[in-house]
Image (cartoon, helix red, strand yellow):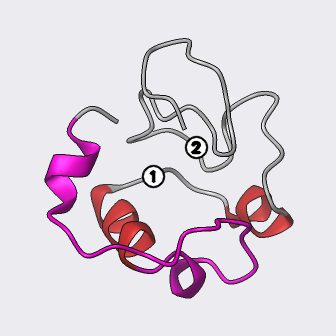
């Protein structure tokens, strides 16, 4: 991931401006079918669940991260 506005996608998509954005919204990133078909927009509650356990939040996603318990506000402050 990168976090700066206009930054490139890497293994994960660029995260700038993610809160309130549509799921699977970054052009050129190869999202999983699960993420593309999820629908809706990212909320703080969604991000909290995603960071803690991506596989439980959205079964079938390609996130190679098992989850991390932290204060979500610190992580998404810049998202």
Say above or below: 28 vs 45: above
Asked whether disc 2 touches disc 1, contact meaning CB atoms under 8 Å apart, the reply is: yes
Quarter of the rendering occupied by the C terminus: top left
Residue 15 is tagged as none
Say above or below: 36 vs 12: below
SS state under label 1: loop
- N-terminal label among 2 and 1: 2
Task: Please give the residue where the numbered disc 2 appears in the rendered image.
Answer: 22
Quarter of the rendering occupied by the N terminus: top right
75 relative to 39 in the view: left or right:
left
How would you rate the neighbour count of disc 1 (Cα within 10 Å): few for under 14, some for 14-19, many for 20 or more? some
What span is in magenta?
A: 53-77
Question: Looking at the rendering, which quadrant does residue 77 occupy?
Answer: top left
> Could you say where residue 35 lies in the image, as x and y percent from the top left?
71, 62
Residue at coordinates 68% horizontally, 84% vertically from top-left?
A: 59
SS state under label 2: loop
36 relative to 65 in the view: left or right:
right
* Closer to the camera in the image, 78 or 65: 65
Label 2 to label 1, Cα distance in Å?
6 Å
Residue at coordinates 56% horizontally, 31% vertically from top-left?
A: 14
Question: Looking at the rendering, which quadrant does residue 3 occupy?
Answer: top left
Residue at coordinates 85% horizontally, 64% vertically from top-left?
A: 33
> Could you say where residue 53 lies in the image, as x and y percent from the top left?
45, 80
Say above or below: 8 vs 35: above
Residue 17: say if magenta: no
Residue 57: say if magenta: yes
> Could you say where residue 66 lies in the image, as x and y percent from the top left?
51, 78
Residue 42 is tagged as 1
The kind of secondary structure the magenta stretch mainly shows is: loop
Question: Looking at the rendering, which quadrant does residue 72 occupy?
Answer: bottom left
């Amino acid at each position: 991931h990168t976090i700066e506005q206009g930054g490139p996608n890497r293994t994960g998509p660029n995260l700038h401006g993610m809160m309130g954005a549509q799921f699977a919204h970054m052009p050129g990133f190869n999202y999983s079918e699960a993420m593309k078909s999820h629908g809706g927009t990212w909320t703080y509650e969604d991000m909290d669940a995603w960071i803690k356990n991506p596989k439980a939040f959205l079964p079938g996603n390609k996130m190679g991260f098992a989850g991390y318990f932290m204060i979500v506000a610190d992580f998404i402050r810049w998202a």
